[in-house]
Image (spheres, helix red, strand yellow):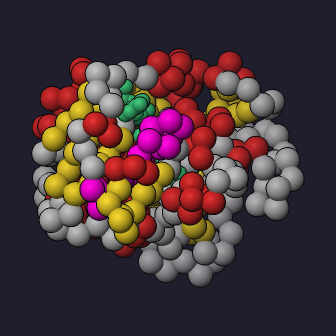
Amino acid sequence: MKGIRLHTRGGPEALVYEEAPQPHPQAGEVLVCVHATAVTPTELLWGPTWKTRTGEDRPFPIILGHEFSGVIAALGAGVTEWAEGDPVYGLNDWFVDGAQAEYCVAPAAPLAPKPRSLDHVQAAVVPISALTAWQALFERASLRAGQRVLIHGAAGSVGSFAVQLARWRGAHVIGTASAPHLDFVRMLGADEVIDYRATRFEESVRDMDVVFDTVGGETLQRSWSVLKAGGTLVTIATQSEGTQDPAVRDAFFIVEANRSQLAEIARLIDDGQLRVFFQEAFPLAQARQAYERAQGGGSRGKVVLRVVS
Ligand SMILES: NC(=O)c1ccc[n+]([C@@H]2O[C@H](COP(=O)([O-])OP(=O)(O)OC[C@H]3O[C@@H](n4cnc5c(N)ncnc54)[C@H](OP(=O)(O)O)[C@@H]3O)[C@@H](O)[C@H]2O)c1
């Protein structure tokens, strides 16, 4: 199969489009014919990209991209819930090869049927960002109707799902973004927006039930002061991974694959209650350009690699 592989640790310049062995599904896994996979540039900084579960260096070559939309191509032993040809979307394991290739292997259980109303390119941007927003708001923070939530990075890939999901849950939503994205965040359903470059958010909000931080660093540190007593702060920012600060360690989590949540997200998308944004699609062979585009920032939604035209 064709794939994008890393033979050394590096940035987009290290990505090589080349022939790679097709993986085989083991028991409980499926082989997915990848139609599209979204680019997460910060994956180049994540621990599991370079380390095994037990902390050793992962052997090269490495294939990135752990979210995808595609079609089941083969079933591993014991898999009965899927059939060849089923359209699915989801995540595979961070510690194994990803989906920037014509085929990838994924555990069968957490995959879900692709949203019917989206094509594969649109569907590929959903799994990581929407699941992260869902798990942050509803699992970690137990957000309820009527509560006040501050979402940092509200125009970003995760933030744009978080604003919509918090609003759907009936919360009062305040989002931070830069000036060019404020109308976008309002359109997603935020009740209030703050231009983070013009205003220090802690001067205009306080007593929040929940703060969801997708930015990290100083934004995270300044967020503790706007929580009400007993409020919950959740952070996903990559720079918080491996922190020594116990409060930040407790607030940080990494998204996990989950079929029932992906299925509920697909239902909301198909019902028109959750909108999906993607920036631009590139052919698989142009992965370097796709990463460079994604690292440029400043736009709405993820960059996608289109594997099947
Ligand atoms: N732990 C996990 O499971 C997990 C899962 C997914 C993502 N992540 C991490 O979460 C972070 C966000 O991911 P993403 O995919 O949503 O990124 P993204 O699409 O690049 O969005 C980031 C957003 O942050 C905004 N921003 C930058 N500085 C800000 C500030 N000081 N205040 C408020 N907003 C600010 C940017 O807005 P403007 O363009 O308007 O400046 C941009 O819209 C990354 O570090 C990613 O690695 C972690």
In the displayed structure, 149 sits above or below 160; it is below
In the displayed structure, 87 sits above or below 80; it is above
Ligand 1 visible in quadrant: top left
x%, y% of residue 10? Answer: 73, 26
Residue ID at (33%, 22%) = 197
**Quadrant, the N terminus:** top right
Instruction: Tell me the quarter of the picture where residue 271 sits.
Output: bottom left
Residue ID at (25%, 44%) = 205
Q: Is residue 282 visible?
A: no
Instruction: Tell me the quarter of the picture where residue 90 sits.
Output: bottom left
In this orientation, which residue lies closer to the viewer: 116 or 96?
96
Residue 220 among those drawn in magenta: yes
Q: Is residue 174 visible?
A: yes
x%, y% of residue 16? Answer: 69, 25
Residue ID at (50%, 36%) = 218
16 to the left or right of 100? right
**Quadrant, the C terminus:** top left
Instruction: Tell me the quarter of the picture where residue 27 sits.
Output: bottom right
84 to the left or right of 186? right
x%, y% of residue 178? Answer: 30, 25
Residue 124 among those drawn in magenta: no
200 to the left or right of 69? left
x%, y% of residue 301? Answer: 34, 34
Residue ID at (71%, 47%) = 47
In the displayed structure, 259 sits above or below 4; it is below
Span colored in magenta: 207-223
Q: How many marks?
A: 0
